[in-house]
Image (cartoon, helix red, strand yellow):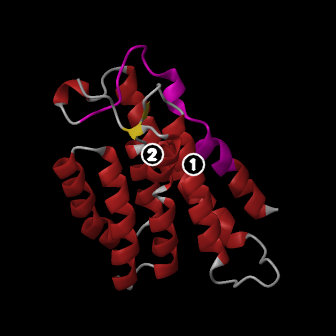
Amino acid sequence: MLPYLFLALAAPLLFVPLWVWRQKGARLGGFDQRAWPRGRNLLITVADVARAALGGWALAKGAELLPAIPGAPADWMPHVWVAVGAGAALAVQAGSWTDEDHFHAPIAFLAGLCAVLVHPLVLALMLPLAIGSALAVRAWSACIFTAGLGMAGVGLAVEQQDWRRTLLLGVAVNAPVLLTVMAGRHLGAARK
């Protein structure tokens, strides 16, 4: 029963998007300073990081305690459940604020998830890749894509982190990028 209590806590934290309460007419942070969140949107951004961290922690705890599926490799299954849950949550966050052309990037939510699911050494090594690519290409999708690649690649080399988690999370993190491509939309805020 205990794993289901953790998962019951994780579900609303991960799958209820806060951005539905954003200020009217506001834009999610872009690459020019004029567009960074302010007021209520700044509070929502901070709350997004905190709830993603708490939800990711509850998801990981619940997944570790789930009974093994017959025939499935027991050492892989907790990591599979964490990756599936994180990828689905990121897809929900990306789709929660859309217009006819754009999905908006769940960067704050991704930061909260990574803070609890990924070892700090892996984060320290992958963040320059993610931030650098976002600034070079001026797109959130590049940040998310290279964060996933960096997480998977660096996680294989860092002994303090279970490589199975970072490998699977690295793939799952790209759910918003793939969703936007399949929907024929862009990821991020419209440019003026």
Give percent across and percent down for residue 149. 36, 68
Residue at 46% over, 80% down = 163
Q: Circle 2 sits in a helix, a strand or a loop, which is it?
A: helix
Residue 72 in magenta stretch: no
Tag 2–tag 1 contact (CB < 8 Å): yes
Q: Nearer the viewer, mark 2 or mark 1?
A: 1
Residue 109's tag is 2
Residue 73 horizontal side relative to residue 14, left or right? right
Q: Which residues are magenta?
A: 9-30
- The quadrant holding residue 37 is top left
Residue at 19% over, 56% down = 132
Residue at 55% over, 56% down = 86
Q: How many marks?
A: 2
Packing grade of label 2 (10 A; few <14, some 14-19, many >=20) is: many
Label 1 sits on residue: 89
Q: For marks 2 and 1, give the CA distance.
A: 9 Å
Query: If you read the primary sequence from the N terminus, does the residue marked by circle 2 or circle 1 appear first?
Result: 1
Give percent across and percent down for residue 144. 37, 54
